[in-house]
Image (tube, helix red, strand yellow):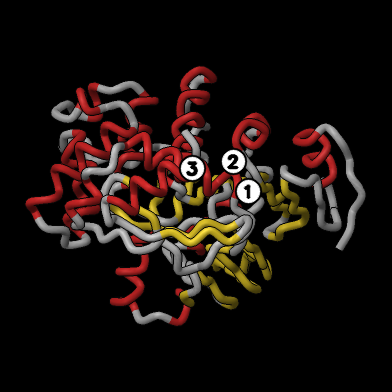
Amino acid sequence: MHLDRFVNHFEKESCCSFSDNASTILIYHFQKNDDTAKKIPYYLKRFLIKQFLNNCNTLSCGTKYCILGSSCSLGGGFHILALSGVSKSFDLKEGRYCAVDKVSLEVRAGAIHGIIGASGAGKSTLLRLINLLERPDAGTVTLDGRLLTEMPEKLLRRERQKIGMIFQQFNLVGNATVSRNVAIPLELAGAPRSGRMERVRECLHFVGLESKADQYPAQLSGGQRQRVAIARALANSPKLLLCDEPTSALDPGTTADILDVLQHIKDMLGVTVVIVTHELDVVRKICTDVSVMEGGRIVDSFSRRDGGFLAPEGHAGSYRERITGKAGEAHV
């Protein structure tokens, strides 16, 4: 169907209003508890999201759309995440160790941004600095236009609900069922009890595990456990999903399945994904943008869309060539 037919359907239902300005489509104000939003066929939502991801060059930061009854920002023309001069050091027996050194990084809304580098490069520490599980010694972290590093702890806890995170070792509660694991972030966020299980079912359906709701983590395969962890990370309808080596504990076949789920999250929900990995195949398969870390610094960044590169240092060029198949010319 043509997009106009979808627009007419939505406006007829009085669910939202549209403004079409060349390369930009703006969809306004789905409320979380709006009953009319629940009547929208799932395939219509899916189509509109694909229109955003494939056709939009610019998008207002305040624009929102609804998917599975929740609201989140999406766009191709602004940065949902920005780090500026972020540093972090730790005191070790051998002395003070700088894990992240003056890192500045911008992540486009709607992208899958890969951060790749060898073990000890600072990738996982950087990820923990993004959601402020670790406080930076210096620098700022901005999410969706809000400066996280300047927020008081109470407000920061609320803003963290916009960030989901999945881990290498799944980090599930062993004596809790699958549905209980997914419900935990909703409980911590104070979500109304009446809506929790509906949201849990939505998230489990999205990752294909609704039939496992009453099972325990020990009864699941590694890939299924990671899917539960992904469902849990989606429970609070995040705008940003952080993935810390999410496939390194999985076999190749299961890795491919999990990467398909992450791609699905980006395509269908419009969630921006930042994935830390040392696996080149992960970056090749799903990442739209790539940053290379070495010695606690971002030493190279490029977009898979246009082949552009920043000035390389150290061994960054070898990553670049292996990911893209070409060296490319450095430019600043």
Circle 2 sits on which residue? 277
Residue 183 appears in the figure: yes
Crowding around mark 1 (Cα neighbors within 10 Å: few <14, some 14 to 19, many 20+) is: many
Among the two numbered marks 1 and 2 on one chain, the one whose residue lies closer to the N terminus: 1
- Observer-nearest of 86 and 212: 212
Q: Is residue 198 shown left or right of residue 124?
A: left
Q: Rounded to the nearest whole Å, what is the CA distance between mark 2 and mark 3?
A: 37 Å
Question: Mark 2–mark 3 contact, CB under 8 Å?
Answer: no
- Residue carrying label 1: 115
Residue 99 visible in this rendered orientation of the protein: no
Give the label, 3 or 1, closer to the camera.
Answer: 3
Pick whichever, 240 or 98, lies toward us.
Answer: 240
Q: Which image quarter: residue 221?
A: top left
Which residue is painted at 78% across and 46% down in the image?
Answer: 306
Name the element at disc 2: strand
Q: Which mark is residue 184?
A: none
Expressed as whole percent of the image width and height from the top left, the position of residue 314 reads 84, 51
Residue drawn at 20 percent across, 49 percent down: 184
